Amino acid sequence: MTGFTHRVEQAAEAMRALFPETPLQQSAYLSRKTGAHVFLKREDLSPVRSYKIRGAFNFFRKALAEGEGAGLFVCASAGNHAQGFAFVCRHFGKKGVVFMPVTTPQQKIDKTRMFGGDQVEIRLTGDFFDECYAAARAFAAETGGLMVPPFDHRDIIEGQATVACELAKQIPANPDLVVLPVGGGGLAAGVTGYLADIGWTPGFLFAEPAGAPSLHESLAAGKRMRLESVDNFVDGAAVGEIGRENFRRLKDFPADAVKLIPENRLCATMIEMLNIEGVVLEPAGALAIDALKDLPRKDIRGKRILLVVSGGNFDFERLPDVKERALRFEGLKKYFVFRFPQRPGALRDFLELLGPDDDIARFEYLKKSARNFGSVLIGIETKDRKNFAILARRFEEAGWAYQDITDNETIAGLVI
């Protein structure tokens, strides 16, 4: 047993004072769908609905044992790390200050306050995480508070590795493949390290948002790379740079071990899991499940596959956007800008081109480009993606001038 393995097992044992092991469940639905034996490690069922409580608990436990952080703990987070931090502050009876961006959804602020109670103060600072993080560090330096990092620290990694410690006792036989979501890399570094130390030799895949591929780019370059821009949709994994210690532990994996998950496809997976399995997942929590779509069925048939479901802190105010993205990915909803004639009967002529399964989801004049014509944004939903080919033919035959803007991110971002 290595020192790392021993420390992880000590952390796992201590953690039982906080919450029981999260369950490992075989998914009958995903198993039937893929032909593999698919198991889900349900970190969305932890007390704070994510695995982040593990790293925070281990950091606090070790800091207090070493006499640090006697006065104040500090963190910066827009979500799951803040909630885990707050829960642990209350558990240990320690004061904590959480810095969150001003743009943080109210639901996440309220849940952090609920978990922390009187032990935690929340400060909203800056529009973006980097500003918020800088303010937290400055505050910690000024007050002597101890910063609790979200992922880039040995004690955080050891805490996240307790996921693997539990898995080793729960799964009936060693898995052929383990799929891990990646944001800052703490979970991936911990789980891969622990399983390797105990002699497991599964394949590993890492699921990363396509709009925030910090691990993929770093592995491809052979060094840590800071992304110039990040799509924040997968907020629990939208990290601009993989952690230093985390990358040191992951640097020997090939870049093609990272699956880049399209955000709109991820939304389809979230809706699928909600409608069929009744499982509520946040975007980051669905990453590993979505990665199954990139695996050829012939390669995984009969294999034992373990997926870590990292979180279920989903704000249902986001559901309309998630459904919208899912429909667009599945080809069941498109947006067009039509050059619409300004004459009586024009709308009726247009509607007569639609089929029985086609529905107008949006109709909005953008502006009148000329006295006889106007630009109209039209959203159409249908029950079969093949219907759009039929519509395109009808539009052409009827002489309608239009542009499909569904996949034009620049225009769609402005008008949809």
Image (cartoon, rainbow, N blue to C red):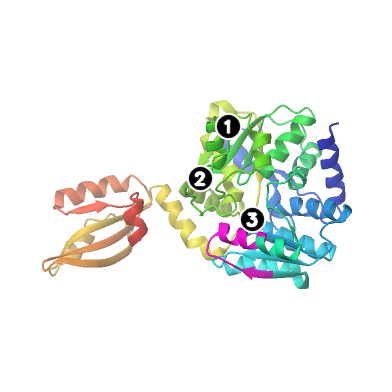
Residue on which disc 2 sits = 227
Q: Looking at the picture, how far across and down is residue 336, in whole percent? A: 28, 55
Q: Residues within 10 Å of mark 3 (few under 14, many from 20)?
A: many
Q: Furthest-bottom residue in view?
A: 118
Q: Quadrant of residue 39?
A: top right
Residue 90 versus residue 179 in the image, above or below: below
Who comes first in sequence, dot 2 or dot 3?
Answer: 2
Give whichever of 314, 77 is nearer the camera: 77
Q: Looking at the picture, how far across and down is residue 156, in whole percent? A: 74, 48
Residue on which disc 3 sits = 312
Answer yes or no: do the residues labelled 3 and 1 have beta carbons within 8 Å?
A: no
Q: Residue 84 bears which disc, if any?
A: none
Looking at the picture, which amino acid does disc 3 mark?
Gly
Q: Looking at the picture, how far across and down is residue 63, in whole percent? A: 83, 53
SS of the residue at dot 2?
loop
Q: Residues within 10 Å of mark 1 (few under 14, many from 20)?
A: some
Residue at point 26% right, 46% down?
A: 390
Give whichever of 114, 134 is nearer the camera: 134
Looking at the picture, which amino acid does disc 2 mark?
Leu
Q: Tell me if residue 190 is in the magenta stretch.
A: no
Looking at the picture, which amino acid does disc 1 mark?
Ala
Who comes first in sequence, dot 1 or dot 2?
Answer: 2
Who comes first in sequence, dot 3 or dot 1?
Answer: 1
Marks 2, 3: nearer the viewer: 2
Q: Residue 257 bears which disc, if any?
A: 1
Give whichever of 360, 86 is nearer the camera: 86
Left or right, 404 with respect to 11, comes to left
Q: Tell me if residue 136 is in the magenta stretch.
A: yes
- Identify the magenta region: 122-137
